[in-house]
Image (tube, rainbow, N blue to C red):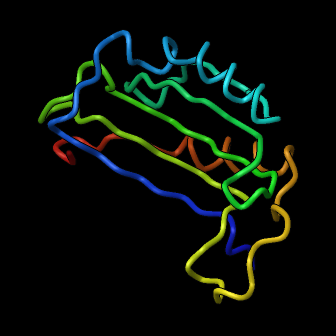
Amino acid sequence: GKPDVKFSLSTNTNLRESVSDSMPNRLPKVREYMRMAGGRVIRSAPVQLGEMKADELLLEGPFVNSVKGHNFLLEANATTGGPETPFLAFVMRNGANSFLFPRYEQVQRASLTDNEAVAVWDVISRTVRPRPYGF
């Protein structure tokens, strides 16, 4: 019943960011961009997912369609990616248009409030775990 709430998970064994491109190092530019766009950083922190270390960034602000919503991101293995430890990105969006809507029925407002979006994110994102030999 909330087609503007989407999750995506991607992995890449060939991607390895430099340390300067890691999420914590991108944060000052992200904060400045969000300030200019009328948004904000809700939370940015390292997280532990089982034995995997990751970084998360929770943003609230306007989407391309001018609807204020959420864009939450979790990245793991950004600087150490490879066949055994692939780069992993898990994303949640709330308030973005979806292919599930007909073209004439665009999202007018995000389905989830800030608190609801963070609560859903906290429950679902903490279940991401690498499986032994699963990558």
Asked which quadrant contains residue 106, the reply is: bottom right
Question: x%, y% of residue 99?
Answer: 55, 79
At x 49%, y 11%, the residue is 25
Examine the rendered structure and indicate whether residue 11 appears above or below residue 1.
above
Question: x%, y% of residue 22?
Answer: 41, 18
Asked which quadrant contains residue 103, the reply is: bottom right
Which residue is nearer to you in this view: 11 or 127?
A: 11
Q: How many marks?
A: 0
Which residue is nearer to you in this view: 127 or 100?
A: 100
At x 72%, y 47%, the residue is 70
Question: x%, y% of residue 90?
Answer: 47, 45
Which residue is nearer to you in this view: 63 or 10?
A: 63
In this picture, residue 75 sits left or right of residue 97 = left
Q: In which quadrant of the rendered image does the C terminus lie? A: top left
In this picture, residue 83 sits left or right of residue 123 = left
Asked which quadrant contains residue 130, the reply is: top left
At x 85%, y 45%, the residue is 114
Farthest front residue?
A: 36
Examine the rendered structure and indicate whether residue 9 appears above or below residue 130.
below
In this picture, residue 83 sits left or right of residue 118 = left
Which residue is nearer to you in this view: 9 or 52?
A: 9
Q: In which quadrant of the rendered image does the N terminus lie? A: bottom right
Question: x%, y% of residue 69?
Answer: 77, 51
In this picture, residue 19 sits left or right of residue 84 = right
